[in-house]
Amino acid sequence: VARVLLRIGDPEGLPLAQGVVDDRSAEGPLAALDRVRVEVAGDAALGVVAHDAARTLFTRSLDLTTEEDLAIRARRLDRLGEAIALAADYDQAVATFGLALEAGRRAMADAPDPNQRAIARSIVARAAESLGTLQVEQLRFAEARQLADEVLELIVDGRDVEAVRLRSLRAEAGAALGERVDSLRDATLALEIARELGDRTTELAALSRYIGVRSETGAATAADWVELEQLAAATGDWQRALAGLTNQGMCLLDDEAAAVFPLTDRAAELAEARGLTEDLAWVDYLRTEAAFVMGDWDSALASGRRALEGGERNAYHRLVVRTWHAVVPIAAARGDRGELAHAVPGELEAAKFPT
């Protein structure tokens, strides 16, 4: 796969020497062909859902990057973090995004001219948004808000793409901390500016977080999530399209739980086709909630265990906490001490449950 993607990523269509994929030295034939091609091939791998190949290619592109090329290193670390987050471990992805942010800050400080500083500034903002997004998923809301504040001060808050995306992140983290009035104001302004800029990907990010802030107050509706799904699908952002689908299902839980399952079937098909590991686990979480509401506890536990397995393996902390909220009441009602011991290890002896 890597060899084919390297050919795709070769802008000149030049043939590759035999063994070039295995040569990681800075002076080898891969470097001679052009170091950028490995990074382009990694982007191509992400585009065709070859996440492991993308991770390998971005790692190799970093091996071919000198310590002095701070901006390039920061960009490639950010892309590597994205590949890791899509298919592997959030803890590892967080660490990688942290390295990208550190390199980007150094590049911004050392930039020899305004153009290079602008490039580094964009990389810093992207890495900070990526890192903050995962911090939110890991329930580290205060850290995400502080990060957004610090980087907004560094890049100078304004009415451009970089500032808008960080302002949206700050709003989402703040809302999770209970700061709803300020967060809604931040999110609303970010969405207004994004729409003025005419950048659809930035508008999508701002819309996603705006709806997320509204959902913290209970104001978000199924129509909001339908709008998100449609805009995300139009721009090819399948993660946010899936978020739109699953949250439509959440809106149906109380009154139309049976209608949730056709949505989860669509979402599971999309997540599997796109290799979106975390999103597939969220689909299982939604199935757990719907089956619980309908009284089908066996199905709820089966899907809940699948969600927990993926969440615990890949450090999806928010998913794990949400899933336990559905699984623990069932286990408690059934007196399932094994399930409860897994949920609250060390605290079970003092508890009394029905047998």
Image: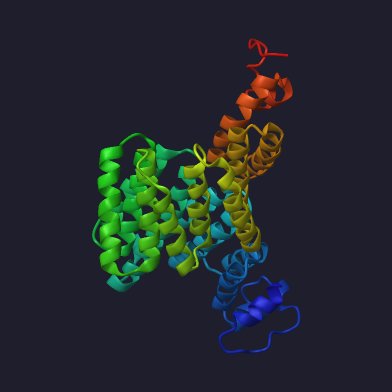
User: Residue drawn 32% across and 63% down?
Assistant: 161
Q: Position of residue 66 (x, y in %)?
A: 53, 68
Confirm whether residue 71 shows in the render: yes
Residue 276, visible in the rendered structure: no
The relative height of residue 74 versus residue 180 in the rendered view (above or below) is below
- Residue 292 placed where, x, y %? 61, 33
Q: Residue at x 57, y 54 (%)?
A: 85
Residue 67 as seen in the image, left or right of residue 203: right
Would residue 234 be found to the left or right of residue 148 on screen? right
Task: Give the residue drawn at x 54%, y 57%.
Answer: 81
Q: Is residue 313 above or below residue 167?
A: above
- Residue 87's image quarter? bottom right
In the displayed structure, 320 sits above or below 220; it is above
Tell me which colouring the rendered structure shows: rainbow
Image position of 26 with respect to 93: above or below: below
Residue 287 x, y percent position in the rendering: 62, 43
